[in-house]
Amino acid sequence: MHISRPEQPAVRETIHWPALLAAISAITAVGIAIGLGLPLLSVILEKRGVSSTMIGLNSAMAGIAAMAAAPLTTWVAQRLTVVNTMIYAILAAAISALGFYYAEALWMWFPLRIVFHGAITVLFVLSEFWINTAAPPSRRGLVLGIYATVLSLGFAAGPLIFSIVGSEGVLPFAIGSAAILAAAIPILMARHENPQISAAPALPFMRYVFLVPTATAAVFIFGAVESGGLSLFPIYATRTGFTESQGALLLTMIGLGNVLFQIPVGLVADRIHDRRILLSLFALIGLVGSLSLPFLIHDWLLAAVVLLLWGGSVAGLYTVGLAHLGDQLHGADLASANAAFVFCYALGMLVGPQTIGVAMDVAGHSGFAWALAFFFGLYVALTVGRMAFGPKRA
C-alpha cells in the first residue's frame, strides 16, 4: 500500500541521549506497572474467591482502556505537547495504582483498570514515538533493542518485586506507584527534546492498523500472550503445585528471557531482508514452548529454562515489528502508526486474559497452555500464508 509522507525529517546519525533516557524511563514505568500489577491483582482476586473467568474479564479491562486511549493519544499530544501529555499520564497511573488497595468492592476495580491502563497506554505510545524519533536509521536496531530490553527489565522486575513483597498490605501498591512517579524526572529533564507532532496524519487511524499486517498481528499475539500470561500464570503455577513465590520466580524467568534476547534480536532484525521469516520463527518457538509446558511444568528447573527461551522469543515479536514501523514512517504518520501498534497490543490484552481464563475454567489448568498454543498457531498460519501467497516485501 502506498501512502504519501509529507514529513521527511533530516536524517540524523547521532543518538539523542536525553530523549532516549526519557523514553526509557517511561517504558520502565510501563513495564514495572504491568509486570507487578497484573499478577498482583489476579492473585488478590483469586484469594477473594473470584472465578478465573471473572479475573480474566477484569484483566481484559486493560485492553478496552488501551484500545480507547491509543487512537486519542496523538491528537492529545499534538495539542498538549508530548512531554505534558506524558506527565499527566504518569500522575493518573500512579494515583489509580494506589486506588486498587483502597477499593474494596470488585466493581470498583473495573473503572480503576480503565484509568490505570489508559494512562499506561499513553506512556506506551508516546515513548515508542519518542524513541523512534531519537534513533538514527543506521542504529535503529540497537536503540530499539535497548528500549525493548528496558521494557523487558520492567516486566521482569514486576514479578520479582511481587515474589519478594507478596500480595498483602499496601507495600506492593506503593512500590508500583512510586516507580511510575519516578519516570517523570527524566522526562522533565528532557523537555527541550520534546518531539513535535506538527501535522495531521496522512491516513485515518484504522488504516494504520492494516498498513503492516504482519507487524500489527505480531504485537496482537504478543499482547494476548503477555497480558494473559502475566495475569493467569501465577494461578496456573499454584494449581500445578508451586508456591506463590515459586510461581512468581517462574514468571520472572520469562521476563529475564526478554531482557537477554532483545538487543541481539534488534541487531539481527536490521540484517534480515524479510522480517516475516524472523517473526515466524519467534511464533513457532512460542507454539512449541506452549505445547510442551504441560509436560514440563512439574520440573521447576526444566520449566524455568524453557520459559527463559520462550520469553525471549515472544518479546521478539514486539521488537521486530516496532523497528519495521520506524523504518517506514515519520512524523505524525509514525506517531499514528505507533498508536495503531499499541492499539493492536491492547486488542491482544483484551482477548488474551479472557480466552485463557475461560480455557482454564473449561479444560482445567492445562487450558492455560492450550490457549497460548492457539494464539501462536494462528500467527504461524498467518505469516506462512503471507510469505507463500502474499505480496513480496522489501
Image (tube, rainbow, N blue to C red):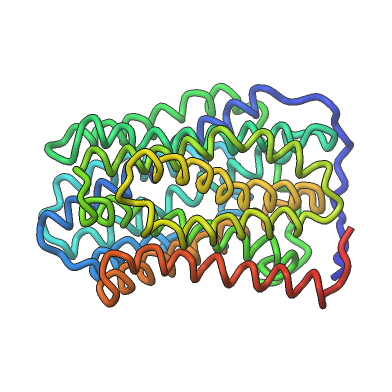
Front position in the image: 231 or 84:
231
Front position in the image: 5 or 245:
245
In this rendering, the answer to whether 215 lies above or below 255 is below
Q: Who's the residue at 23% across and 38% down the image?
A: 245
Q: Who's the residue at 78% across and 64% down the image?
A: 202
Q: Position of residue 201 (x, y in %)?
A: 74, 60
How many numbered discs, if any?
Answer: 0
Instruction: Work out whether residue 357 can be spotted.
Output: yes
In this rendering, the answer to whether 382 lies above or below 321 is below
Q: Position of residue 307 (x, y in %)?
A: 45, 45
Position of 164 with respect to 23 (left or right) is left
Please identify the quarter of the rendering in which residue 387 is found: bottom right
Position of 75 with respect to 142 (left or right) is left
Q: Who's the residue at 58% across and 48% down the image?
A: 313
Q: Position of residue 343 (x, y in %)?
A: 55, 62
Q: Which quarter of the figure is the C terminus placed in?
A: bottom right
Position of 27 with respect to 303 (left or right) is right
Q: Which quarter of the figure is the N terminus placed in?
A: bottom right
Front position in the image: 143 or 15:
143
In this rendering, the answer to whether 323 lies above or below 187 is below
Instruction: Work out whether residue 68 can be spotted.
Output: no
Position of 52 with respect to 201 (left or right) is left
Q: Position of residue 217 (x, y in %)?
A: 63, 65
Front position in the image: 295 or 118:
295
